[in-house]
Amino acid sequence: MYQQHHDGICASTLAWRRRLGQATIGRIYAQFTERKAKERMSLQCPTVLGIDEHSLHRKQRFATTFCDLKNRRVFDITPGKSDADLQGFL
């Protein structure tokens, strides 16, 4: 439900589909967003960082993946590959 609302499905449509109130959908979305933000803030920066760029759609759109090489996990993914695209992330 969070992902659907995040992707643009309005609260009234989700409320109708799930037989919930729009305010309930809003509260669930806000709580989940807050929980995700806290999880992101509590992440430890990797000691060994791997960076890779890859094409998303016929070499027209790119994304950059940051990996924690020590723990073998994806740390984050951000759109773009240029210095300007990544400036806000770094």
Image (cartoon, rainbow, N blue to C red):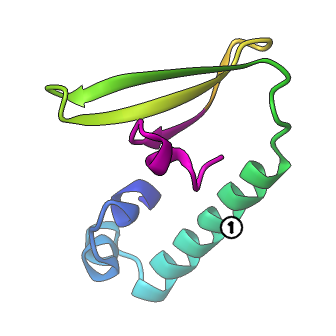
Task: Name the spot of residue 44 as percent of width and height, x first.
Answer: 85, 37
Q: Is 79 included in the stretch rendered in magenta?
A: yes
Q: Quadrant of the N terminus?
A: bottom left
Q: In this view, which residue lies farthest toward the left?
A: 58
Instruction: Label 1, secondary structure: give it.
Output: helix
Q: Is residue 48 above or below residue 89?
A: above
Q: Amino acid at mark 1?
A: Glu
Mark 1 Cα shell of 10 Å, populated few (<14), some (14-19), many (≥20): few
Range of residues picked out in magenta: 76-90
Decide: is 42 above or below 51: below
Give coordinates of residue 83: x percent, y percent: 49, 42
Q: Residue at x 39, y 41 (%)?
A: 80
Location of residue 12 (image quadrant)? bottom left
At 73% from the left and 50% from the top, the residue drawn is 40
44 with respect to 6 (left or right): right
Q: Could you tell me which residue is drawn at 69 percent across and 60 percent down?
A: 37
Q: Nearer the viewer, residue 71 or 80?
A: 80
In the picture, measured across the screen, residue 10 lies left or right of residue 75, that is left
| Residue occupying image coordinates x 48% and y 88% | 23
Residue at mark 1: 34
* Residue 62 drawn at (x, y percent): 32, 34
Whether residue 70 appears in magenta in the rendering, the answer is no
Q: Of residues 40 and 57, which is closer to you in this image?
A: 57
Residue extending farthest to the front is 83
| Number of numbered discs overlaid on the protein picture | 1
Q: On the rendered structure, is 58 left or right of 62? A: left
